Image: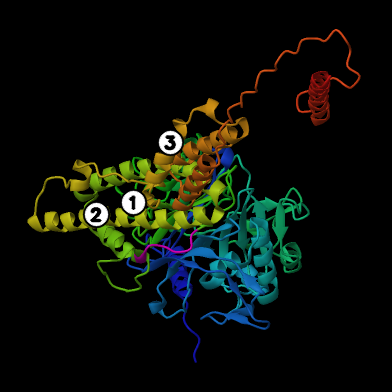
């Protein structure tokens, strides 16, 4: 079978043409963003990206289960890359292309979080220069974006582990593309550039800086000896040095100047400017995207300090930004290729938080189609076992029951006239998004309560709550789309206002919503009975047991997340305590003692005592003997 032509190869050709002509042609391109935890409003770290492969490019959001593999089992993708499976692979979420594109069952798993709380966005495509290509060309059967997410999320234990694993794969099997990847976990985030067929460099991202990442290498000087903060291929420096294209600063390799394309391309530079300006106005204003007199571009900074702290919603809006109100306003000048462009198939922000239970640190905020007129929905990616059915439709043309297609079609229409159609759609989604972000705070609190009861229960409800909020968002999007189609057909020149906006239909993102109904009547009746018990009628120990079980029963009854098993157990224990009450026994009255007159003569036997049989018999015998003597004396007198 002939070798398949890769989508990324087509994109590279388009981008190469754009760079060569210096034109405004729109190339397939992605855009990455990083915000460190020290410069976010809530202390979370964020990595994110838009997947700009093209409008109408079907995406499926699903979960790949954990798997065990037989010895010798081989992973192989549609582009010819293969490697042995490990004994076990982990569960992970993924946003993949439809298999109907013909590139395998799990092509382009662009984003996800695995059960170890490793989050990854892969990839932002980049391009190397001719000297790097000649020295270390890309490998046709090397690892590509097509399978990178599946392999790394299936195997990574930590973010660093993921970087090291990818590095080992690139060195052993080669890479079929130059790519930028970001990987994070609750402790740290990493940025990695694959710069040629077998060379790469990665850095631990600082917590007090940000990055705007279009399709161009941006990694500056790296100290390859700093193994705590840098992971690099063994030949990164030596290959360039031996082939005469090594560029250094302060004795360290400058990665972009050494390996990067001489001309990044206009579309990359305009998005670099917009992204830099969004994160730091002053730095953006001072950024030149024109070449120097000798035709050299840059160098440009990958990392810099922002001019404020950013909220979750600020970071989401980054991927929809079009330079509004600036000298790079894509709404005013269509030749300026924008961050928020029509080629976005999905957009995502991966948020990592401190101090959460296992599985709850990462929130995967996922928006289908373009960010501008879409909505990011929150998912506990490390805990999901399933996603809503509306994410699973693989049709390559518009269908009514697809989450991807309803947002794609809505964006298509809103794009036609941003002011007339899009203004109030954006207003509605902004309000809806803000509510989701705010409600996430309470959901976190409640999910932690569930986790304390049972990690399995928390996972079950994380999956259920993900499904219901997806259904809700779909319903609102479908309503807007239906009304907008009718509005457009009517030819109205007034501003479109969706009914969900006027009716203020907001999300109901709560854990209580997905809790099963429970019956508490029996428990309530027993609580009332226990509260009526009179303490002084029962033994101290049995009443203490009742008090303890009554307190437990009240706690369970007051818990809005108590499941039926907990309620039934509390009912049984309280009933047992009631049955076990022991009454205090009444005292038995004792007979009064008779007083005995003291004899003047002391008896020869022992004094009688109550309950003593021996003295009593002695008294009876003595009395009988005395009477017999008297009778005999009387008889004898009569005989005389």
Q: Specify few, some or many for label 1: CA neighbours under 10 Å numbering under 14, 14-19, or 20 or more.
A: many
Q: Specify start and end residues of the magenta stretch as a single range.
A: 384-389
Q: Name the residue under label 2.
A: 414
Can residue 352 be seen at all in this image of the molecule? no
For image coordinates 29% across by 57% down, the residue present is 474
Q: Quadrant of residue 171?
A: bottom right
Residue 224 to residue 314: above or below: below
> CA separation, marks 2 and 3?
63 Å
Q: Which mark is residue 556?
A: none
Nearer-N-terminus badge (2/1): 1
Q: Which of marks 2 and 3 is in front?
A: 3
For label 1, the residue is: 372
Q: Quadrant of the C terminus?
A: top right
In the rendered structure, find residue 529 and report the number of the disc placed on it: 3
Q: Distance from label 2 to label 1 (Cα)?
A: 9 Å
Q: Nearer the viewer, residue 525 or 119?
A: 525
Task: Name the spot of residue 62 as percent of width and height, x first.
Answer: 44, 66
Q: Is residue 548 left or right of residue 19?
A: right
Q: Do the residues labelled 2 and 1 touch (CB within 8 Å)?
A: yes
Against 127, is 433 above or below? Answer: above
Question: Which label's residue is closer to the chain start, 2 or 3?
Answer: 2
């Amino acid at each position: 079978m002939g070798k398949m032509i890769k989508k990324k190869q087509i994109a590279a050709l388009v981008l190469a043409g754009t760079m060569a002509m210096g034109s405004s042609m729109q190339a397939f391109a992605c855009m990455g963003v990083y915000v460190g935890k020290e410069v976010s409003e809530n202390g979370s770290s964020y990595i994110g990206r838009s997947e700009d492969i093209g409008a109408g490019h079907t995406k499926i959001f699903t979960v790949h289960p954990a798997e065990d593999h037989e010895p010798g089992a081989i992973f192989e993708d549609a582009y010819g890359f293969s490697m042995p499976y490990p004994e076990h692979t982990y569960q992970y979420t993924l946003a993949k292309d439809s298999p109907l594109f013909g590139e395998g069952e799990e092509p382009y798993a662009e984003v996800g979080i695995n059960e170890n709380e490793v989050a990854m966005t892969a990839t932002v495509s980049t391009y190397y220069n001719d000297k790097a290509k000649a020295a270390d060309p890309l490998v046709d059967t090397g690892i590509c974006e097509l399978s990178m997410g599946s392999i790394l999320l299936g195997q990574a234990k930590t973010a660093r582990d993921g970087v090291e694993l990818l590095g080992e794969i690139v060195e052993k099997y080669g890479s079929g593309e130059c790519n930028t990847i970001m990987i994070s976990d609750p402790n740290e985030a990493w940025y990695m550039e694959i710069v040629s067929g077998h060379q790469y460099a990665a850095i631990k991202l600082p917590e007090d800086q940000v990055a705007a990442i279009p399709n161009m290498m941006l990694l500056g000087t790296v100290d390859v000896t700093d193994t705590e903060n840098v992971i690099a291929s063994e030949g990164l420096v030596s290959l360039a040095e031996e082939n005469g294209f090594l560029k250094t600063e302060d004795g360290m390799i400058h990665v972009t100047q050494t390996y990067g394309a001489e001309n990044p391309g206009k579309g990359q530079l305009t998005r670099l400017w917009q992204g830099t300006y969004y994160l730091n106005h002053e730095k953006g204003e001072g950024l030149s995207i024109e070449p120097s007199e000798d035709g050299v571009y840059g160098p440009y900074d990958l990392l810099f300090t922002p001019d404020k702290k950013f909220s979750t919603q600020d970071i989401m809006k980054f991927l929809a930004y079009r330079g509004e109100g600036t000298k790079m306003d894509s709404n005013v000048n269509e030749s300026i290729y924008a961050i928020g462009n029509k080629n976005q198939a999905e957009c995502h922000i991966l948020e990592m938080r401190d101090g959460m239970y296992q599985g709850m640190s990462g929130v995967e905020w996922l928006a289908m189609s373009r960010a501008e007129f879409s909505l990011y929905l929150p998912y506990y990616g490390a805990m999901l076992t399933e996603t809503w059915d509306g994410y699973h439709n693989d049709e390559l043309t518009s269908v009514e029951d697809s989450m991807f297609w309803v947002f794609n079609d809505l964006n298509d229409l809103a794009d036609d006239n941003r002011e007339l159609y899009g203004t109030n759609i954006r207003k509605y989604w902004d309000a809806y998004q803000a509510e989701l972000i705010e409600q996430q705070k309470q959901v976190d609190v409640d999910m932690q309560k569930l986790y304390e009861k049972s990690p399995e229960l928390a996972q079950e409800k994380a999956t259920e709550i993900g499904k219901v909020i997806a259904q809700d968002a779909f319903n609102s999007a479908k309503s807007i789309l239906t009304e907008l189609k009718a509005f457009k057909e009517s030819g109205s020149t007034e501003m479109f206002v969706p009914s969900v906006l006027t009716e203020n239909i907001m999300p109901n993102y709560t854990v209580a919503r997905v809790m099963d109904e429970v019956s508490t009547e029996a428990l309530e009746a027993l609580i009332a009975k226990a509260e009526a018990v009179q303490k002084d009628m029962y033994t101290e120990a049995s009443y203490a047991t009742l008090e303890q079980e009554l307190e437990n029963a009240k706690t369970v009854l007051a818990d809005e997340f108590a499941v039926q098993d907990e309620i039934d157990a509390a009912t049984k224990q309280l009933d047992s305590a009631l049955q076990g009450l022991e009454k205090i026994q009444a005292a038995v009255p004792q007979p009064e003692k008779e007083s005995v007159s003291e004899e003047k003569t002391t008896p020869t036997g022992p004094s009688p005592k109550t309950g003593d049989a021996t003295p009593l018999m002695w008294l009876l015998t003595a009395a009988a003997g005395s009477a017999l003597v008297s009778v005999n004396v009387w008889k004898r007198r009569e005989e005389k």
